[in-house]
Image (cartoon, grey):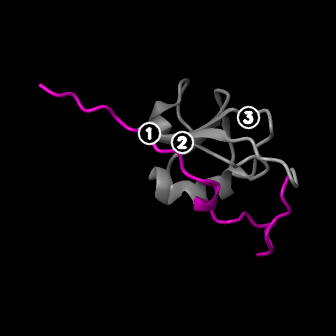
Amino acid sequence: MQVRQKRHVEPTVAALPPSTDGGGEPAAPNNAGQSQRTVFCQCSIHDGHFPVSGMSVGEVRRVLAPLLHIESDTVAVINGQIVEDDVVIGDDVAMLNFVKPSSVKGGTWR
């Protein structure tokens, strides 16, 4: 019997549309001339490392929704804490999860 192993393919930076500054203009890169650190983003079984530092959680939700199958009713969690869509992802963030409200420990959300 053959066992197939799951193959994880890392998306390239070109797979993400450029973030905007809110007015439709592309945002200035955080580290001009340097490679941008990636953040591990996950929604259910879908995950990957993406260059989202400096973006708001809401921007990440919109940009990655087609790739990670993020539904509108999911809750964003950074470092075990529920965060709103207006929170900006800092350079210290290693993981951003989008989970169903029922998956959040300690009760209901919103």
Residue linked to disc 2? 48
Q: Is residue 4 magenta?
A: yes
Q: CA distance from mark 1 to mark 2?
A: 8 Å
Residue at point 62%, 61% (across, down): 14
Range of magenta residues: 1-30
Q: CA distance from mark 3 to mark 1?
A: 22 Å
SS class, disc 3 = loop
Q: Which circle, 1 or 2, is nearer the viewer?
A: 1
The residue type indicated by label 3 comes to Val
- Residue 70 seen: no
If you read the primary sequence from the N terminus, does the residue marked by circle 3 or circle 1 appear first? 1
The residue type indicated by label 2 comes to Gly
The residue type indicated by label 1 comes to His
Residue at point 21%, 28% (across, down): 3
Residue 95 marker: none
In this rendering, the answer to whether 95 lies above or below 58 is above
Q: CA distance from mark 2 to mark 3?
A: 14 Å
Q: Identify the residue at the far left of this view.
A: 1
Question: Where's residue 47, x and y in %?
Answer: 50, 41
Question: Where's residue 95, x and y in %?
Answer: 64, 34
Q: Residues within 10 Å of mark 3 (few under 14, many from 20)?
A: some
If you read the primary sequence from the N terminus, does the residue marked by circle 2 or circle 3 appear first? 2
- Residue 96 seen: yes
In this rendering, the answer to whether 5 lies above or below 69 is above
Q: Are marks 1 and 2 in contact (CB under 8 Å)?
A: yes
Corner quadrant of residue 24: bottom right
Residue linked to disc 1? 8
**Does residue 47 appear to the left or right of 62 in the view shown?**
left
**Does residue 73 appear to the left or right of 94 in the view shown?**
left
In this rendering, the answer to whether 66 lies above or below 82 is below
Residue linked to disc 3? 93
Q: Is residue 15 magenta?
A: yes
